[in-house]
Amino acid sequence: MVLATNYRSRWGEVDIVTRLGDEMVFVEVKTRRGSAFGTTEESITHTKSQRLITTAQRYLEQEGLEQADWRIDLVGVQLDHSGKLLAVNHIENAVES
């Protein structure tokens, strides 16, 4: 169940907040056309990881879910230069808290 999209806090943004069973899942979606700027996985820098973790924790606090199990996933979308979908890659636990 999707609970929020583009959730923003003063620390950052999470693209999708969802609940999968008893677990909260925060999803970062990255789209790339070609590899000039690296892979979607490489786009999650240490700084970005820290912002995602802090933003997820803020959401949990705000909703009274501090004790909930949670994770941060990455969905990488690869397009060719004309915009045609080449691949979608879902990485669970892409960011370790």
Image (spheres, rainbow, N blue to C red):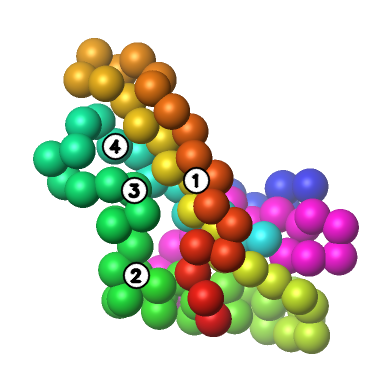
Amino acid at dot 4: Arg
- Label disc, if present, on residue 75 of the rendered structure: 1
The residue pinned by badge 2 equals 48
Magenta stretch contains residue 17: yes
The residue pinned by badge 4 equals 32
Direction right: furthest residue: 21
Amino acid at dot 3: Thr
The residue pinned by badge 3 equals 40
What is the spatial separation of the Cα atoms under label 2 and label 4, in whole angstroms? 17 Å
* 80 to 70, vertically: above or below: above
Seen from the viewer's position, the closer of residues 15 and 85 is 85
Mark with earlier residue (3, 2): 3
- Label disc, if present, on residue 86 of the rendered structure: none
Amino acid at dot 1: Val
Q: Residue at x 13, y 40 (%)?
A: 36
Mark with earlier residue (1, 3): 3
Neighbor class of circle 2 (other Cα within 10 Å; few <14, some 14-19, many 20+) is some
Horizontal and vertical percent for residue 63? 74, 75
